[in-house]
Each structure stands twice: as structure tokens, then as C-alpha cells.
Amino acid sequence: MTHESTPDTSMPVRSRSRLIVGNWKMYKTIDQALSFLDKIIPLAKDVDCKVWLSVPFTAIKPCADKAKDSKVVIGAQNMNDAAEGAFTGEVAASMLHDAGASFVIVGHSERRKIFSETNAFINRKVKRALASKLTPLLCIGETFEEHEGQHTKEVLKKQLVECLDGISKEEFDGKVVVAYEPVWAIGTGKAATPEIVEQVHLFCRSVFTEIFGKEAAEKVLLLYGGSVTPDNANGFLLQENVDGLLIGSCSLSSESFAKILKLRHNVIF
């Protein structure tokens, strides 16, 4: 006699995949990056989520070579909006693609704040990334003052509309990933609650519906980032409209990153 397993009704019904992204920022030499991959690549084979790592420019080529034929996808943390030119110290999307990057982070709050990147500049990056066969991972988020002033929706809508201006439905549909990273929660230890993030993500999907239609809005992967740890990650992943996580500090340790990857709710429903 066979026994059918009982479905876990605590899991939300989903059609989108889970995506866990590590953003190393300005950390790790090539040797350190490769050592990290030695530990994560075998683990990634047994987790039911997509695993992306956004590594320093210097580590893209060696990491992409090492991760080839594995579930780990390598990407970049930034790019210039121009195809090429006399821009000392800048990196073009075509160069990232040539080095083995599959995606690139654009619009991160650190780029907006420290380097004064505007929505218009980020919009040009999104377009250049798409044209160069890179998946743009677009970051949005409000400051503490905007959050406290209850301007979150206003700020996020402006960022989404302006950063995605001129992007066609065909370009957007399944080809852009968006991460909500409230500035007041990044690196502060003050993570937003899962309930707040779920409501924000629902609002973002309503904006996508206005711009690209309901079908495309339902397909886009929406990630949360901001003081994510192995202890609080599962609370976010339990939310129906949280499709994954963009992790900073805790992605630097293979042990803490592995704990998040192995959470039981990192599944494709």
C-alpha cells in the first residue's frame, strides 16, 4: 500500500522561481572568491533555488570559468551606460558579458547616494544591459526620511517609472529582475518586516501592471534586500510576493550564505 505525501499548506502557492543573490561589494580577491565557490558550487546542486553571485570586476572571469556548468551564475555590480569611449576607470556592458557575466546590478542605493546616480542614468544602464545580453537587476528603495514621512510608494513608483522608461513589454517580460532595498535597512541591522516587504512588493507589481500589463507583472522576480541574515531570511521567503533575496554582508561568508540557500522554503512551486 502506498501513502501519498501531505502537501505543506503553510507554503504560498507560486509559479515564480526563487532567486538568491549575493552582492560582495568591494570585498574578496580572486583567490578568496574561488575558495568561496569551492564551497558553494557543490551545495548549489542540491538547492531548489537559483543562485547568483555579484562579484568584483577582477573576479568575474575566473569565477565565471569556475562556475561554468554549475547552478551558480556570476554577475557584475555596476557598469557604465555607454557602449565604449574615453571614460577612464569605467566598464562597459559588452566587457562584462565578454568576461562571463550574465547579469549586472543597477541602481543600488550606494551608487545613487555616493556616486549621485540618477534615475535617468540608471535607465540608460538598464537599456544598455538588455542590449548587451545582460539581465539588469534593478534596485529601488526609499530613505529613512522618506519612509518615516510615508512617501515610500511615491518614491518607489517614481524610481520604477523613470528607470524603466522606454523599455518595451517584450524587453521587460522575464528579462528584468527588481530588488526592493529600503535604504534605511541596508547594513543597519534594521531589516524591514516581512509584512511591510510583502505590501511593498504588491504595490510594485501594481506599478508593473500599469506599465507592462498583468501577465508581465506576475512574472517579474521581486527580491528583498537589507540586513538579511540566516535568522530572518525565511520570514521574507514565506511571503507570496517575495521571490528571493539580495544579500550583502551575509553573502561574504560561505557558511551564512549556505544557511540561507538551504532554507526549506527556497523552492520552486
Image (cartoon, rainbow, N blue to C red):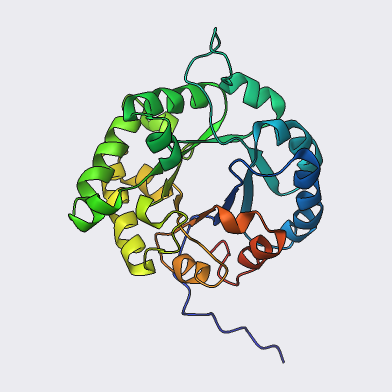
Q: Is residue 13 visible?
A: no
Q: Tell me what residue is drawn at x 58 percent, y 19 percent.
A: 89
Q: x and y percent of residue 4 in the render?
A: 63, 84
Q: x and y percent of residue 56 in the render?
A: 65, 36
Quarter of the rendering occupied by the N terminus: bottom right
Relative to residue 164, is residue 38 drawn left or right?
right
Q: x and y percent of residue 53 in the render?
A: 64, 46
Relative to residue 9, is residue 249 drawn left or right?
right
Q: Is residue 146 visible?
A: yes
Front residue of 6 and 85: 85
| Rendered position, 83 above or below 48 | above
Q: Residue furthest bottom?
A: 1
Q: Which quadrant holds residue 120?
A: top left
Q: Residue furthest top?
A: 86
| Rendered position, 112 above or below 7 | above
Number of numbered discs present?
Answer: 0
Q: Tell me what residue is drawn at x 64 percent, y 26 percent.
A: 97
| Rendered position, 31 above or below 255 | above
Q: Tell me what residue is drawn at x 62 percent, y 55 percent.
A: 251
Front residue of 204 and 86: 86
Q: x and y percent of residue 158 in the render?
A: 24, 38
